[in-house]
Image: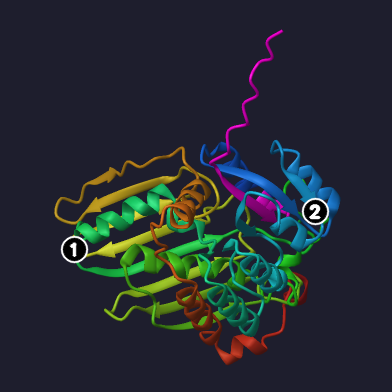
Amino acid sequence: MTVPAQHPAEPDERTGWVIAGAGWVARDHMAPALAASASSRVVAVVDRDLEAARALAARFPGAVAHDDLSAAFATPGARIAYVATPNHAHREVAVAAAQAGLAVLCEKPLAADLDDAAALVAGCEGAGVVAATAFDQRFHPAHEVMAAMVARGDLGTVTAVRIVYACWLPPGWAPPGSTTGDNWRVDPVRAGGGAYVDLAPHGLDLVGTLLGEDVATATTHLQHRVHDYAVDDGSVLVGSTPSGVLVTISNSFNTVETLPRRRLEIVGTAGQLVATDTMGQDAGGRVEFLDAATGVSRDVEFDRGTSPFAGELRALEAAVTGGAGWRFPMARDLRLLHLLHDAITPASRSAEPRTLEARA
């Protein structure tokens, strides 16, 4: 009898990811991008809530669930750790991943306080791994097209960037699909702030990505206007770049969902770009270019089907596996986080929360 030859299984060349933190953004935005990527696979999910880790791992064939960081980061095939825990836990998780030899993609902000953020960056740099902050808006196809138009000179001399990025986040808010009602984003200990700390980092990073230069000076006013919690529910940052571009970034947790709440404008001497509904986790939106010479507006074409998370993971994998390099060092992200905190006015820091009932 002839025995068929046994052939070893082909090695899986896809990049192995560990998801650390099985919450809303990881579950509903990064996980679908990883599942749709031909170059990626999830090898493990780790969360203090083992059942949550198991539920997310079950979506990926062969992925294992853990409630122990060391075990998860030692999973065979692991190359990159996506850190999506609450902000106060970022340092512990990211440094553990780096020390295990994994590249790190850490959600923003880097940490709930500046000391932890600095220690996180130092830990990743000391381990010699590729480390990135998860500013997915860098990779939204609309924003990539807008950045190319600015670089090409289509807008002439850029004079201003204006961003509105807002949402409705009442005290008892729970992410879609969650029944816990644990709104850690308004917990001053776990989040480190409110709407400002949660949303403004995206705007600061995006300005630098679009213009090729970062905001260098800024002043911020915080708002305690609608929701009865200990952190701000709105903010406005006013700043400028070294070349003199004026920047305003308005954020809030107090804008109801039925109102316009996501808008990005870049103003120049030759034209203006206006993007609506591109800020956020989803694909799509609209971009218009208003030609200053003719007064005519036209739609700008871009890939409306690819989420910013898909572009983000592709770019990081290229840096980790192909030596493409990573354009956004964490040290730069840490400088922007310092600017974010330093910009807050003393009056805003000392403001007491105010509710609608209190003003009535």
Residue 226 visible in the displayed image: no
Please give the label number shown on residue 218. Answer: none
Left or right, 186 with reference to 344:
right
Q: Residue at x 60, y 85 (%)?
A: 348
List x then y, in percent, for residue 58.
Answer: 76, 39
Query: Looking at the image, which is closer to me, 186 or 13?
Result: 13
Dot 1: what SS?
loop
Mark 1, other Cα within 10 Å: few <14 / some 14–19 / many ≥20: some
Q: Give whichever of discs 2 and 1 has the lower sequence position.
A: 2
Q: Which residues are magenta?
A: 1-26
- How many labels, in total? 2
Q: Most extreme residue toward the left, as rendered?
A: 293
Residue corresponding to mark 2: 66
Residue mark closest to the camera, 2 vs 1: 2
- Measured in 3D between alpha carbons, the distance from the residue under mark 2 to the one under mark 1, in whole angstroms, is 53 Å
Q: Residue at x 61, y 47 (%)?
A: 29
Amino acid at circle 1: Gly
- The part of the image, by quadrant, that contains residue 221 is bottom right
Residue corresponding to mark 1: 156
Amino acid at circle 2: His
Residue 29 visible in the displayed image: yes
Magenta-drawn stretch contains 265: no
Magenta-drawn stretch contains 13: yes
Left or right, 43 with reference to 321:
right
Left or right, 123 with reference to 63:
left
Left or right, 352 with reference to 306:
right
Q: How is the image coloured?
A: rainbow
Q: Most extreme residue toward the front, as rendered?
A: 1
Mark 2, other Cα within 10 Å: few <14 / some 14–19 / many ≥20: many
Taken as a whole, is the magenta stretch helix, strand or loop?
loop
Q: Residue at x 67, y 86 (%)?
A: 351
